Image (cartoon, rainbow, N blue to C red):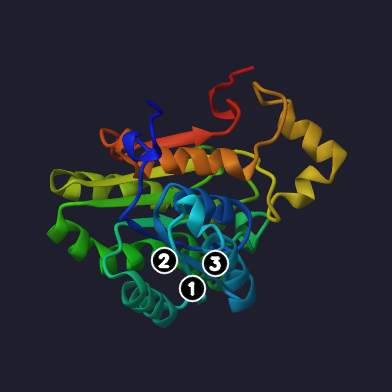
Amino acid sequence: MAIGLQDTLFDLAGRSAIVTGSSRGIGEAIAFRLAQHGANVVINGRKIEPAEDMALRINARQNDGFGKAVAVAGNITKPDDLTALVKQAEAAFGQIDILVANAALHIHVGPSQDMSDAVLAKTLDANFFALHRLSQALLPGMVARGFGRIVNISSVAALFGSGNYHSYTLSKTMALQYIRNIAVEHGAANIRANSVAPGLTRTDMAKSIIDNPALLARELSRSTVGRYGEPEEIAGAVLFLVSAAGGYVNGQTIAVDGGISIRYE
């Protein structure tokens, strides 16, 4: 007898998820794969049209066992937009079991002397405070129900020092520690909080590197696999963490980076 999806460790039927920044790139791949495995998914982006297009793609696959999708526009740097995101998500699906904090900003490259307070504040709002504010809103319900999964999409850049990416790496590193704290605080309530740290991945944010032969060669010289990653490969790690397969993983940072972070020479 064939084994169905419901018999696997990756079945998400009956679960609902918010994935920020899910109308394109890594977030799009994550939302699609969670829905493919049965989860209802809230598609979020700054503009409603791409989010609605993504939701339509998922909803067209209902006969294939996909969960449902709704689109909610919002700017993750604005607390009121995050509050509205949670309210609309709960109105659509009731309880929210999974949060994937994927949307991020990378708006400053250069020496620390040139990093203004305004740039740092905006970067922290996107890359740290959005995770914190959404977690604060969703954790009480997760704890009450005895189930919750929070995944922070970080970056391998948060694992190293940088002379150019000051605000970005700082914000991403703060989020890593926040996830560890949540894991300790709520692990006994069946909450799992983890981070996924992608390496160079084919996204709009990485386009300037991928399209520059010299920069790409420098990046790949550190790789153990000789190529950049695909959004689907990040989605696979997230699917593992939010499903039963990852139930014994808590407070960890999983680098999906082609081995860049383990290479000494």
| Mark identifier at residue 55 | 3
* Mark 3, secondary structure of its residue: helix
Label 1 sits on residue: 77
Question: The C terminus is located in which quarter?
Answer: top right
Question: Left of 90 or right of it: where is 100?
Answer: right
Query: Of the residues shown, which amino acid type is indicated by label 2?
Result: Ala
Horizontal and vertical percent for residue 263?
A: 59, 21
Disc 2 from disc 1: Cα separation: 7 Å
Query: Of the residues shown, which amino acid type is indicated by label 1?
Result: Thr
Label 2 sits on residue: 130
Disc 2 from disc 3: Cα separation: 22 Å
Q: Nearer the viewer, residue 53 or 187?
A: 53
Q: Nearer the viewer, residue 96 or 109?
A: 96
Question: The N terminus is located in which quarter?
Answer: top left
Q: Are marks 2 and 3 in contact (CB under 8 Å)?
A: no
Select label 3 or label 1 by which is in front: 3
